[in-house]
Image (cartoon, helix red, strand yellow):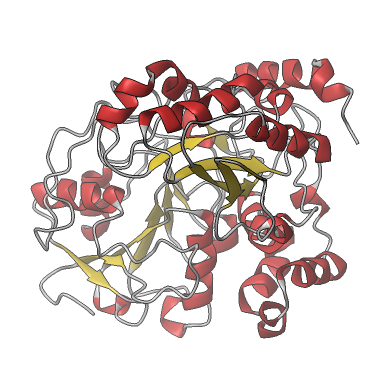
Amino acid sequence: MSDNNASVAFLLFEKPRHKQSSAAFDDGNNMGVHVVRDVLERAGVRVGYCTPETAKHFRVVLVSFTSKHDVIELYRRVSKRADWQRPRSFVAIGGGSGMQNPVAIRNLLDMAVFGRSEAFVAELVVSTLDAKPFEHPSVMHLPDVSDVEIAQAPCLYPNRIIGPDKRHIGGWSEASIGCKNKCMFCHYAFTRKTLAGNSWNDSGNTESTLLDLVNAGATRLRSSIKGQLVTALDGTSERLRCLFGKPIKAHHVTALIELLADAGVGHIVKLFNIGNFPTESKSDWDELRDCCLAANPRAHVRIAVQTTPFQPEPLTPMQWEAVRLFPNLKRMEQSPIARTGNVEVFHGRYVQGPMPQLSSALVARATPQTDAAFAALCMSSKLRAMGSEQGVRALLKSFDLSPVTREYEIGEQLPTWFLRSYTPTHKIERMAQRMRARPEYANSKG
């Protein structure tokens, strides 16, 4: 796939081999790509699409990383290709929400862009096309690693986006940026300034905080929800949630189940959760079960709990925490959380096991010393043939991954030492210190 009339193209993986990869963004789901494309075309730069094979026909290739798994996918697709080795015939520029640490792919990109780039991306691309130098605090020139600052959007994107197929995007316009809820584990909250928007979302698949839902009441829920209701628990016990910035009490979980039945929207609810938190134990999961069993809804309520393993995200108060690969959360997938009367709470599909968790951590905490482990993760057919747990144990046995998985002292230099955001580092450190000093944390260690 190529566009011979364009000098600039977004790299497109036409058939991603792994469901975690979001690189197939030709269907309009990746709004960041379409915003950048809109900015460039308004500046007179025509943008096409290319594959790893056709990238050599363009002068600038833009690579969108919507998650850390896209970093892995890029390495798998192009690291062995001769036309992607330096010196390349094109300039490869990477960016997106998954661009947190480019070290693992520093030889596959020429520049890494951090944060919202609409204010400068046109100048960056035009300067590159004209072979002129371009410097910006949010652009890292690779393979060298240097300090960068996460760029902030000056305002909500002012233009409505119409996709090239006229169907999928349907005149999208940006409603808000950032999040007022500063959950201690959330990279987005600490790297995107909040602009406009409300916590309640009245359209499509309703997404709102669990407390918002409880406070809204049955009447508003009934009139507002047009599709599947989606919200977040982010911790199986009141202790974990309150410790890590999610002030949801145990009785709120019980109240939500009864409220869903009263509103007539309990047919299926998706509840996002984070598992393998620091200090998490079986008793935390037991509390979730007990809260569900305590509910007495008037109608049947089905809740799918979609659990993702905790990641120490850069620039958050929890960036110094350890990666807990075990217990293997995948093993819980077939077991119900709670089932009685009108209540059915179960694990959602595709609960991640330890291999996706370690893969993300290996990208987020990549250093030159982890290059060999990252290459094995991406390219070893023997490793990929193993089960998730067996593969993780093989990696841990073959490589020293303690810098990736260990707990760091607050203020100790992290692999992502080069990142800065609008939230001052000293403020993040103070939040982390207060968290670790709380009895709920200190008394549960180990």
Vertically, is 226 above or below 38? above
Q: How far across and down, in percent of the image, does residue 93 sit?
A: 37, 58
Which quadrant of the figure contains the N terminus?
bottom left
Tell me if 60 is positioned left or right of 169 in this view: right
Residue sitting nearer the eye, 81 or 26: 26
- Residue drawn at x 40%, y 56% is 94
Tell me if 300 is positioned left or right of 274 in this view: left
- Residue drawn at x 36%, y 44% is 228
- Residue drawn at x 41%, y 61% is 22
Vertically, is 192 above or below 4? above
Q: How far across and down, in percent of the image, does residue 160 sit?
A: 12, 41
Vertically, is 23 above or below 421? below
Q: Quadrant of residue 330?
A: bottom right
Residue 91, visible in the rendered structure = yes
Q: How far across and down, in percent of the image, does residue 122 sit?
A: 21, 46
Counting every numbered tag in the picture gives 0
Residue sitting nearer the eye, 133 or 104: 104
